[in-house]
Each structure stands twice: as structure tokens, then as C-alpha cells.
Amino acid sequence: MPSDKDAEKAPGDSVFVCSQCGECCIGYGGTFVTNQDIERISAYIGTDPRGFVEQFCNLSGDRPVLAQQDDGHCVFWDKVCTIHPVKPQMCRKWPYIESLLIDFENWNIMTSMCPGMKKDVSSRVVKDWVKKMISCTES
Ligand code: SF4
Ligand code: SF4
């Protein structure tokens, strides 16, 4: 098990390095987009927010989620994320989700779905990253 001292040398890489396998970009769980996401992505792909929601989103309840291609991949997946610089908050936060602050066991469950997440990591390092992501996305 890595020590906190080891983790401090390279905090991000010590717990997660994305292999860009795309596993998290497939499925019907729903990638929610905030109003800010909609504005950023619309500007990036050169459309207006209303047209973006109509063309690229479905509704989950009354909230827009990114639509899927026929094979279940996100509408913006094409071997890589084609909107990477402006991808939704939900995608940018992964795997540093807020529930880890409440129950760190979630990390070990999530590692079975995401090969980029390392097992037996320092909970303190992960929780620090969760807090950083919250402060980044709130600003
Ligand atoms: S499943 Fe994990 S490793 Fe694969 S693309 Fe998603 S974040 Fe990266
Ligand atoms: S926006 Fe990009 S990172 Fe997010 S699910 Fe779609 S393809 Fe994956």
C-alpha cells in the first residue's frame, strides 16, 4: 500500500491515470450537462445552446443528458472525446466524485469499472483531489 509520503510526490498520477479506454463514455447512465456545460460546448462546436440541447441531448426527468450513438457511446465519442477541452463537469470530475468524501469504499467499487483508477490508494490523497475538484468547478 502506498504511503501518503509517496503519494505526495505525484498526487494525481499516484491514484489515477486515464488510459483513454472509453469505458466511461458508453452506457445509458446519463452524463448530465449543466447550463455552463451547455454554453461552453455550444460555443466550442459552433452552435447555440438551444440547438445544442435539441441536437445532442436527451432529457432525464427535466434535466438534459448527452445523447448516445446507436452503440451506446456518448454522442461526442469518436475513439477519443471530441469535446475534451470543454467536456461536461461530470466528465472532468471523474473519478473524484463527492460521495468519496462520505464513503471511501466507493473508490474500490469504481476501480472495477475504470482501469485508470489504482487500487489500495491513499484515501487522504483522493479526498484532497475531490475537494480540489469541487473548488475548481464551483469557481
Ligand atoms: S474508464 Fe477510466 S481509464 Fe477509461 S476512459 Fe474512462 S476515466 Fe479513462
Ligand atoms: S463528453 Fe467526452 S468524456 Fe464525457 S462521456 Fe462524452 S465522450 Fe466521454
Image (cartoon, helix red, strand yellow):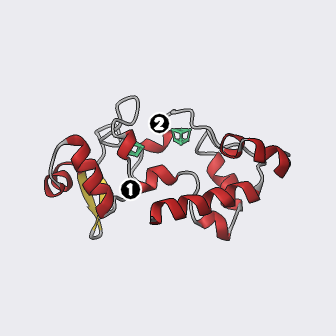
SS at circle 2: loop
Q: Quadrant of residue 35?
A: bottom left
Q: Is residue 114 above or below residue 97?
A: above
Question: Can you identify the residue that label 2 sits on?
Answer: 22
Q: Quadrant of residue 117?
A: top right
Q: Position of residue 130 (x, y in %)?
A: 61, 60
Residues at marks 1 and 2, CA–CA distance in whole angstroms? 15 Å
Q: Amino acid at mark 2?
A: Gly
Residue under the image location 77 percent in, 42 percent down = 9
Q: Position of residue 102 (x, y in %)?
A: 66, 71
Query: Circle 1: is it few (<14), some (14-19), or many (20+) Cα within 10 Å?
Result: many
* Horizontal side of residue 10 vs 27, given as left or right: right
* Horizontal side of residue 24 vs 54, given as left or right: right
Residue under the image location 28 percent in, 48 percent down = 41
Query: Circle 2: is it few (<14), some (14-19), or many (20+) Cα within 10 Å?
Result: some
Residue under the image location 67 percent in, 55 percent down = 107
Residue under the image location 29 percent in, 52 percent down = 40
Find out whether the residues at labels 1 and 2 contact each other: C-beta distance under 8 Å: no
Q: Position of residue 66 (x, y in %)?
A: 31, 52
Q: Amino acid at mark 1?
A: Gly
Q: Nearer the viewer, residue 27 or 8?
A: 8
Q: Nearer the viewer, residue 12 or 27?
A: 12
Quadrant into which the C terminus falls:
bottom left
* Horizontal side of residue 57 vs 3, given as left or right: left
Q: Nearer the viewer, residue 138 or 51?
A: 138
Mark 2, ligand 1, within 8 Å: the answer is: yes
SS at circle 1: loop
* Dot placed on the residue nearer the N-terminal end, 1 or 2: 2
Q: Position of residue 85 (x, y in %)?
A: 38, 41
Question: Can you identify the residue that label 1 sits on?
Answer: 30
